[in-house]
């Protein structure tokens, strides 16, 4: 509303959580011009099942009226969103709708934007901190895609009072906390997280989490962003740092006397020290990248297999803490036998003294999305921005940069064969940093959450989730499975709900064939006492969806099935199949 109708909208303010300013570059469908394999299909499948659920019975007096409205909706709009998303593979008006970064100036009202370090939309939240109007504020915490007071990752904060503070002033002009006026908040309040393993960031049952970082205030984030962007542009073309900007540092790629790939903060030697290295596909390069959208599980795991099966460069153990915060760029010189649809994945990991490697940040790109490429064999230099990062590498830890043409299943593969080489001597990793002194002097604290209202709720069967990688012969399968358990909400139509999701992504060793299969099942049972034309006490429905995505270098094949039935007797209410063959679209390439 604030963007589409800035002159006429009655909206005075808004609080936006885990949202994006660009639906093409920073949403669950595409990233860097590449399809997000396990995000695109997973979210489509989730919405496929939810869109088939019936309307609330309380809106209807008769069960027959309720059923006819539901059936009409199934007939008209039950197809999933997947075909629409895969038919719009390039930036287009389809994605511009709802993307405020087309013109930030149109958002004139104050916005409070919330982001999470374990959420998929963190980069967009940081961009809002740089581009929204001066009355807006941004908080980026350690959270998943869930409310900051209940996130499974912590520390949690008291979020409802935060909202009350913001709305009280911007809607009523009243500060409810004179000592904590929302107009005096820093532009950006950011959680800077220390080196961690996945279990370190999870809250205990009582909401507690260890000392894994701190919130830091940045009141000049817009100016910082401009300085860093200028330095990154300079460094992309030169081999030296601009004078007077201590917020930007560089690692160079090299090879030591033992012939090991290294990252070094020292200036590169005058003579090239590394020959070009071929970037090869391996099915385990993306095995532990985690889910794109995390709500209560699906965190990235140990990156050791990814590092060892990619072209990787590691620093020596750090003598002192190193802070990586904000934007970072990998400047890479590459050559290829064919530039058509060349994909590249870059990942930064934190290697602990015991060998465990945590994923810190990453990016994935179709290189033709970054710049149009010639079809001959010339080499080109690219600047690849990585996702927003806020991380403190502790002493004794190593920083590792890994490069590969594959990150399946998080990145759906190109499937266009090409011999791709990286030229390490002409590469550098540029990152934004800050001093420990600044962090110590600008630490901020938030109140802990108050006890939430107690709502009658119980899970009558246990919930579970799992992730499994199997490697049999020349096939590798990645399986995500989630079982919500049977949830019972007595206060909401005596609602009982069960959800099961099974996602399978399969490829061969060379990543030349891929297939994804997702099955979802939803069972919903609710009181039907409000219906006047039935004596049934309960009505139960079962929604089952099945999607298969496959294809080759030229096209996608999408097969979908929806079956709706009564859960008590199993009688089928509605069933439909769809099959689409969708041509793959390429970003512009010179002939």
Image: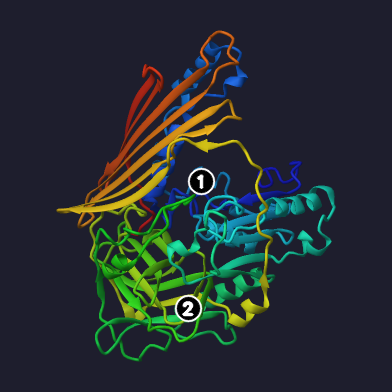
User: Whole-percent x and y of residue 321?
Assistant: 50, 81
Label 1 crowd (10 A; few <14 / some 14-19 / many >=20): some
**Could you say which is closer to the camera, residue 208 or residue 197?**
208
**Could you say which is closer to the camera, residue 455 or residue 430?**
455
Direction left: furthest residue: 473
**What quarter of the picture does the C terminus occupy?**
bottom left
**Could you say which is closer to the camera, residue 500 or residue 108?**
500
Image point 62% across, 76% down: which residue? 439
Image point 55% across, 50% down: which residue? 146
**Could you say which is closer to the camera, residue 436 or residue 468?**
468
C-alpha gap between disc 2 and disc 1: 40 Å
Direction bottom: furthest residue: 270
**What quarter of the picture does the N terminus occupy?**
top right
Circle 2: element type: loop
Residue topped by disc 2: 394
Tell me where residue 541 sits by quadrant: top left
Drawn side of residue 140 relative to residue 34, left or right:
right
Asked whether residue 108 is in view, the answer is: no
Drawn side of residue 14 relative to residue 172, left or right:
left
Drawn side of residue 188 relative to residue 23, left or right:
right
Tell me where residue 216 sits by quadrant: bottom right
Asked whether residue 188 is in view, the answer is: yes
Tell me where residue 267 sits by quadrant: bottom left
Residue topped by disc 1: 95
User: Whole-percent x and y of residue 190?
Assistant: 61, 66
Drawn side of residue 478 relative to residue 57, left or right:
left
User: In this rendering, is residue 227 above or below 515?
Assistant: below
Label 2 crowd (10 A; few <14 / some 14-19 / many >=20): some
User: In this rendering, is residue 387 above or below 409?
Assistant: below
């Amino acid at each position: 509303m604030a963007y589409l109708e800035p002159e006429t909208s009655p909206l005075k303010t808004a609080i936006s959580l885990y949202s994006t300013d660009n639906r093409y570059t920073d949403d669950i469908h595409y990233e860097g011009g590449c399809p997000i394999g396990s995000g695109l299909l997973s979210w489509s499948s989730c919405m496929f099942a939810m869109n088939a659920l019936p309307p609330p019975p309380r809106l209807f007096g008769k069960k027959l009226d309720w059923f006819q409205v539901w059936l009409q909706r199934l007939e008209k709009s039950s197809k999933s969103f997947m075909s629409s998303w895969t038919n719009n593979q390039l930036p287009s008006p389809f994605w511009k709708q709802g993307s405020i970064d087309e013109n930030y100036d149109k958002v004139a009202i104050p916005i409070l934007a919330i982001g999470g370090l374990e959420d998929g939309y963190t980069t967009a939240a940081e961009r809002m901190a740089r581009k929204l109007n001066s009355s807006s504020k941004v908080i980026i915490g350690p959270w998943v895609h869930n409310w900051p007071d209940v996130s499974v990752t912590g520390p949690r904060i008291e979020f409802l009072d935060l909202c009350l503070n913001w709305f009280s002033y911007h809607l009523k002009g009243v500060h409810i906390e004179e000592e904590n006026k929302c107009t005096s908040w820093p532009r950006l309040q950011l959680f800077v997280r220390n080196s961690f393993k996945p279990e370190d960031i999870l809250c205990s049952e009582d909401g507690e989490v260890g000392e894994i970082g701190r919130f830091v205030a940045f009141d000049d984030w817009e100016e910082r962003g401009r300085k860093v962007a200028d330095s990154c542009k300079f460094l992309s073309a030169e081999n030296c740092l601009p004078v007077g900007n201590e917020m930007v540092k560089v690692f160079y790629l090299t090879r030591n006397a033992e012939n090991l790939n290294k990252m070094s903060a020292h200036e590169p030697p005058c003579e090239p020290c590394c020959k070009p290295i071929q970037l090869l596909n391996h099915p385990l390069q993306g095995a532990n990248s985690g889910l794109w959208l995390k709500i209560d599980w699906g965190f990235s795991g140990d990156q050791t297999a990814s590092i060892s099966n990619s072209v990787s460069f590691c620093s020596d153990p750090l003598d002192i803490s190193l802070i990586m915060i904000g934007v970072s760029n990998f400047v890479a010189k590459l050559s290829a036998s064919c530039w058509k649809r060349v994909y590249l994945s870059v990942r930064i990991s934190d290697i602990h003294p015991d060998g465990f490697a945590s994923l810190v940040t990453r990016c994935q790109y179709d290189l033709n999305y970054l710049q149009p490429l010639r079809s001959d064999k010339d080499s080109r230099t690219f600047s690849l921005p990585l996702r927003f990062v806020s991380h403190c590498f502790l002493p004794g830890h190593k920083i590792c940069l890994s490069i590969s043409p594959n990150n399946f299943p998080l990145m759906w593969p190109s499937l266009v064969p090409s011999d791709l080489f990286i030229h390490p001597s002409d590469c550098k990793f540029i990152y934004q940093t800050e001093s420990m002194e600044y962090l110590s002097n600008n630490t901020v604290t938030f109140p802990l959450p108050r006890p939430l209202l107690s709502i009658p709720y119980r899970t009558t069967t246990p919930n579970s989730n799992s992730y499994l990688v199997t490697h049999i012969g020349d096939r590798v399968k990645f399986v995500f499975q989630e079982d919500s358990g049977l949830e019972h909400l007595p206060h909401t139509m005596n609602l009982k709900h069960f959800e099961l999701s099974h996602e399978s992504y399969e490829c061969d060793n060379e990543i030349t064939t891929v297939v994804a299969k997702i099955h979802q099942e939803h069972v919903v049972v609710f009181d039907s006492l409000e219906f006047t034309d039935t004596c049934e006490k309960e009505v139960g429905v079962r929604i089952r969806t099945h999607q298969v995505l496959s294809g080759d270098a030229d096209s996608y094949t999408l097969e979908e099935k929806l079956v709706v039935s009564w859960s008590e007797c199993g009688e089928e209410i509605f069933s439909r199949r769809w099959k689409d063959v969708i041509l793959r679209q390429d970003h512009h390439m010179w002939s």
